[in-house]
Amino acid sequence: MALIDNFSLEPKPKRQKIDNNNEFSSSSTSSSCGHCWVCYGVCTACKSTVDNRQGRSFDYLFDGLQLSHDAVALTKRLVTKLSCLNEKKLHLVLDLDHTLLHTIRVSSLTEAEKYLIEEAGSNTRDDLRKLKAKGDPMEYLTKLRPFVRDFLKEANEMFTMYVYTKGNRDYAKAILDVIDPKQIYFGKRVITRDESPYTKTLDLVLADERGVVIVDDTRDVWIDHKSNLVEISKYRYFRMNRKESKPYSEEKIDESENDGGLANVFEIAQGSSQWILQSRRRAGVRGREAAATRD
């Protein structure tokens, strides 16, 4: 219940009202401007040069984009409110490696796994691909986790989805060309180690964290957001070391599609989504009733 308990969408304590004549309007002087939207270091309102410490970079959405801390907070609240009310969607943040798939260097395959090279180059399997990332001379094999395509399709009906990976942007793009070639699921909402090299944080996700569900196989990287995390079992298809028992690849079997990690996590995420949206509707009803009573 810890995950659901975290997602109370009761209003947060009121913050100081934003002055429309200050923060979100153009100003003739930089001292009176909130520098809400900055592009390549220049405020779009007052045209002054802005230090990158005065906000947070969102390069992954638009090159050179920086938002002030107040603009980030406001955008998160508005995005979540509109998403819940209009689309009936929350936000889902997905890891890639060992969560949705497993990738290995071709040179690291064991003798018992090398049959997969030929299978990846054939038309008989849509869950196994050869992969080359831009700027990387190595060739890789990527094995999609069972149920991943159905998971993405169904989750897309309930969530606005982000990818958040510790891989670099070129690797993420190569993977997304496989699982989301038409950018139906993620669009530009792809956060990589280029933006977040050490840990993962919801600070980079433009949504109120109370309405965000995280699915990741590694708990420790989410230092400040463990209560949002649905930890999924680590998907290991290829052999990772010599001491482990035979992996799926050598046994020529795979994780269950109906009762594997993604199927189980989908049920949890679906339940969380329904509960949170119902809570928001109830909060809205209570708010209207309270307003009517005051009138």
Image: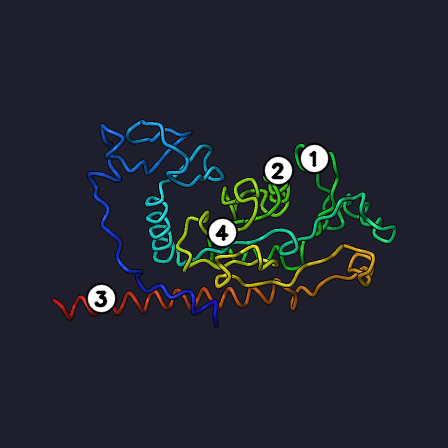
Please provide percent x and percent y for residue 270. Answer: 50, 65
Q: What residue type is labelled 1?
A: Asp
Residue 284, quarter of the rendered image: bottom left
Asked whether the residues under the numbered discs 1 and 2 touch, taking CB atoms below 8 Å apart as contact, a structural biologist would say yes
Mark 3: secondary structure: helix
Residue that carries the numbered disc 2 in the rendered image: 170
Label 3 with label 4: CB-CB less than 8 Å: no
Q: Which residue is drawn at 83% across and 57% down?
A: 242
Residue type, mark 4 in image: Thr
Residue 236 lies, in percent from the top left, at 72, 58
Q: Residues within 10 Å of mark 1 (few under 14, many from 20)?
A: few
Circle 2 — which element? helix
Which residue is the site of mark 1? 136
Tag 1 and tag 3, C-beta contact below 8 Å: no
Q: Residue furthest bottom?
A: 1
In front of the other: 184 or 245: 245
Work out how far the residue at label 2 is from the one at label 4, CA to CA, in angstroms. Answer: 21 Å
Per the image, the residue denoted by label 4 is 201
Which amino acid type is marked by label 3?
Answer: Arg
Which residue: 63% across, 54% down?
100
The answer for how far apart the CA atoms under marks 3 and 4 are is 34 Å
Q: Say few, some or many: other residues with alpha carbon within 10 Å of mark 4 (under 14 / 14 to 19 / 20 or more).
A: some
| Residue 115: image location, x then y, percent | 84, 50
The label shown at residue 208 is: none
Give the number of the mark in front: 4 or 1. 4
Q: In this view, does 259 lie above or below 115?
A: below
Residue at 61 percent across and 65 percent down: it is 263
Query: CB atoms at circles 4 and 1 under 8 Å apart?
Result: no
Query: On the rendered structure, is 134 left or right of 245?
Result: left
Q: Is mark 1 on a helix, strand or loop?
A: loop
Residue tagged 3: 288
| Position of 246 relative to 117 (above/below) | below
